[in-house]
Image (spheres, rainbow, N blue to C red):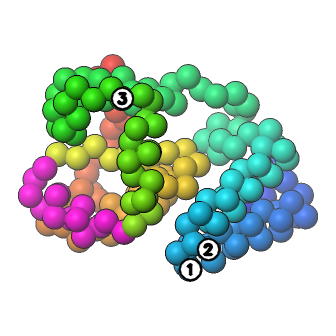
Amino acid sequence: HSQVLKSLGLISQKTFEELLSIEERTQLYLEKNELANALGSWQDEMKKMKATIGSVNLYDLTRFTIDVTERNYWHFLQQPHVRKAIHVGNTILDGGMNVLNRLQNLWMLDKLSTFAKILDNDIPVLVYHGNFDLVLPVEGISAALENTPWKHRRQWCEADRQVYHFTN
């Protein structure tokens, strides 16, 4: 984030160095598998960005309030065919907290080999990534998909893309 903000001229050299230092610290925590510390460090960076430029949204730096559409995945998850596909039955989906609580001990573990097996068995998958999300970062998910060894990887990498809206 520091490099993008600096290149846009939104932060001073001092702030750039402070953010870069936090990013390097986060990376070290990740390399040591100190996930709780990595999350805390990442949150420190978000706080610094919010205090400096008023936003943590690199996709729309003019927006300083929460966009109500950021949780539009909830509507997608309510569709009967989606609920069936993700095997949730009649489980009440409370905006994601049940999922987060269940996955607390599993997050940030490398699951690419399992993911490749799912894809190789032609099981349809919806891939989610979050804006400034440490667990599911946009660039991280894209890189993972491009590097996952599965039988249709080349075709997927070359395929046209379209935006999914919950009203589709």
Q: Secondary structure at mark 1?
A: loop
Part of the protein shown in magenta: 110-123
Residue under circle 1? Answer: 32
- Direction left: furthest residue: 121
User: Residue type at mark 2?
Assistant: Tyr
Query: Mark 2 or mark 3, which has the lower sequence index?
Result: 2
Q: In which quadrant will I find the C terminus?
A: top left
Above or below: residue 154 compared with residue 72: below
Query: Would residue 143 be visible to someone looking at this image?
Result: no
Whether tag 1 and tag 2 are in contact, CB under 8 A, the answer is yes
Q: Please state the horizontal and vertical placement of residue 65, each as a whole percent of the image.
A: 70, 27
| Residue 118 % position (x, y) | 16, 58
The residue drawn where x is 86% and y is 60% is 15
**Residue 24 quadrant:** bottom right
Secondary structure type for disc 3: loop
Badge 3 is on which residue?
A: 93
Q: Residues within 10 Å of mark 2 (few under 14, many from 20)?
A: some
Q: On the rendered structure, is 157 left or right of 102?
A: left
Which three-letter amino acid code belongs to the residue tagged 1? Lys
Q: Position of residue 13 (x, y in %)?
A: 88, 64
Q: Which residue is mark 2?
A: 29
Q: Residue at x 51, y 25 (%)?
A: 69
Does residue 43 show up? yes
Main structural element of the magenta stretch: helix, strand or loop? helix
Disc 1 and disc 2: Cα gap in Å? 5 Å
